[in-house]
């Protein structure tokens, strides 16, 4: 089991870094994911699905930590008034924002793009994504919080 986890750790770390761009939280997500894998390896029924199961565990841990981090998010006014963004040219701001959106998990990214870029209504998004209005609003709120966190750096 030790060798399996040691071999899987670089892949877990890489996937967590792609999914979740906060360095200190990436380490936490990796550690938590490894612990969950260690504890729940017996629930895996087919050995060939180990990689998919492992990435699912990592993704869930990243999302769990993102939700926890969102509770500490600063108001948007703090980000808007951040001196670092005041001196960036518009093109650089676009790059920063694009990177922040790209860092989102797919289900949050889709909602943010539909609402804030394509300017769809919540009802249109709910119909297109086959979600309830409440689910769309929650994902939109979480996505914006994650973007704020990313931009705060």
Image (cartoon, rainbow, N blue to C red):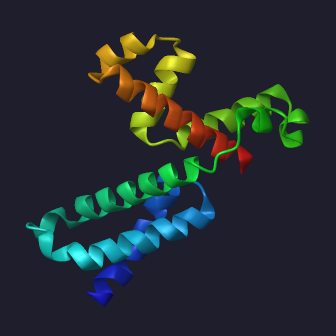
Would residue 22 appear left or right of 46 to someone viewing this image?
right
Establish if 141 lies above or below 33: above
Establish if 114 lies above or below 108: above
Q: Nearer the viewer, residue 15 or 20?
A: 20
Establish if 30 lies above or below 103: below
Establish if 38 lies above or below 28: below
Would residue 135 appear left or right of 147 to someone viewing this image?
left
Q: What's the residue at 79%, 32% (across, down)?
A: 80
Give the percent coordinates (x, y) of residue 98: 63, 34
Would residue 144 appear left or right of 78 to someone viewing this image?
left
Would residue 87 appear left or right of 64 to someone viewing this image?
right
Give the percent coordinates (x, y) of residue 60: 36, 55
Give the percent coordinates (x, y) of residue 66: 51, 51
Q: What's the residue at 84%, 40% (across, down)?
A: 82
Q: Disc count in the image?
A: 0
Q: Nearer the viewer, residue 85 or 70?
A: 70
Where residue 51 sits, quadrant-wise, is bottom left
Give the percent coordinates (x, y) of residue 20: 52, 54
Quadrant for the N terminus, please.
Answer: bottom left
Q: Nearer the viewer, residue 40 or 53?
A: 40
Q: What's the residue at 71%, 29% (across, down)?
A: 94
Q: What's the residue at 60%, 57% (across, down)?
A: 22
Q: Residue furthest bottom?
A: 2
Where residue 79 sits, quadrant-wise, is top right
């Amino acid at each position: 089991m030790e060798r399996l986890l040691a071999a899987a750790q670089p892949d877990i770390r890489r996937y967590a870094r792609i999914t979740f761009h906060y360095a200190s939280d990436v380490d936490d997500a990796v550690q938590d994911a490894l612990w969950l894998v260690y504890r729940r390896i017996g629930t895996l029924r087919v050995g060939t699905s180990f990689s998919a199961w492992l990435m699912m565990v990592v993704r869930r841990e990243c999302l769990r930590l993102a939700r926890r981090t969102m509770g500490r998010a600063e108001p948007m006014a703090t980000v808007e008034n951040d001196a670092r963004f005041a001196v960036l040219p518009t093109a650089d701001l676009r790059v920063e924002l694009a990177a922040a959106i790209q860092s989102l998990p797919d289900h949050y990214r889709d909602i943010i793009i539909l609402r804030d870029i394509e300017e769809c209504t919540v009802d249109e998004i709910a119909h297109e994504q086959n979600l309830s209005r409440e689910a769309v609003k929650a994902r939109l709120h979480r996505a914006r919080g994650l973007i704020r966190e990313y931009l705060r750096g």
